[in-house]
Image (tube, helix red, strand yellow):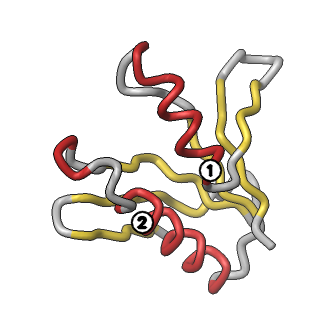
């Protein structure tokens, strides 16, 4: 099942993770550069989490891939302020942001 939340041209989208029951994998979040720092990303991610809870999902995760090397700190700050933590898969060295829903 695909899930997409939009606010104008800004959006977050993901899919229920069939390999990890109870998890929602978000594949992309996009906020127009001219619309950043206005709370849009937080509203999108909050609505995404609410939808996950409605579906009985327990975890949201996504690959941590910043837009540019310069945006790593801002990206980490954004997810951290929204309750996500950075994890690294020891087998693949892939970086993930993860949040357990309550």
Cα distance in 3D space between marks 1 and 2: 14 Å
Residue 102 versus residue 38: which sits nearer the camera? 38
- Disc 1 crowd, CA 10 A, few/some/many (<14, 14-19, 20+): few
Relative horizontal placement of residue 51, taking residue 87 as reference (left or right): left
Residue 92 versus residue 9: which sits nearer the camera? 9
- Residue at 50%, 62% (x, y): give it: 45
Relative horizontal placement of residue 66, taking residue 97 as reference (left or right): left
Labels 1, 2: front one: 1
Label 2 SS: helix
- Residue at 40%, 47% (x, y): give it: 28
Mark 1 vs mark 2: which is more N-terminal?
Answer: 2
Question: Which residue reaches farthest front?
Answer: 38
Residue 89 versus residue 84: which sits nearer the camera? 84
Q: Position of residue 38 (x, y in %)?
A: 32, 57
Residue 16's image quarter? bottom right
Residue named by callout 1: 81
Q: Is residue 9 above or below residue 57?
A: above
- Residue at 37%, 68% (x, y): give it: 4
Label 1 SS: helix
Residue 90, disc = none
Residue named by callout 2: 44
Q: Position of residue 15 (x, y in %)?
A: 51, 60
- Residue at 67%, 79% (x, y): give it: 53
Q: Is residue 2 above or below residue 20?
A: below
Q: Position of residue 93 (x, y in %)?
A: 71, 16
Q: Is residue 68 above or below residue 3?
A: above
Relative horizontal placement of residue 59, taking residue 75 as reference (left or right): right
Quadrant holding the C terminus: bottom right
């Amino acid at each position: 099942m695909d899930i997409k939340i939009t606010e104008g041209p800004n959006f977050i989208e993901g899919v229920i993770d069939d390999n990890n029951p109870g998890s929602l994998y978000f594949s992309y979040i996009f906020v127009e550069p001219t619309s950043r720092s206005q709370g849009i990303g937080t509203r999108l991610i909050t609505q995404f989490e609410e939808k996950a809870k409605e579906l009985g999902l327990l975890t949201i995760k996504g690959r941590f891939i910043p837009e540019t090397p310069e945006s790593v700190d801002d990206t980490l700050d954004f997810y951290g302020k929204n309750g996500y933590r950075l994890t690294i898969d020891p087998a693949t060295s892939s970086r993930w942001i993860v949040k357990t829903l309550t």
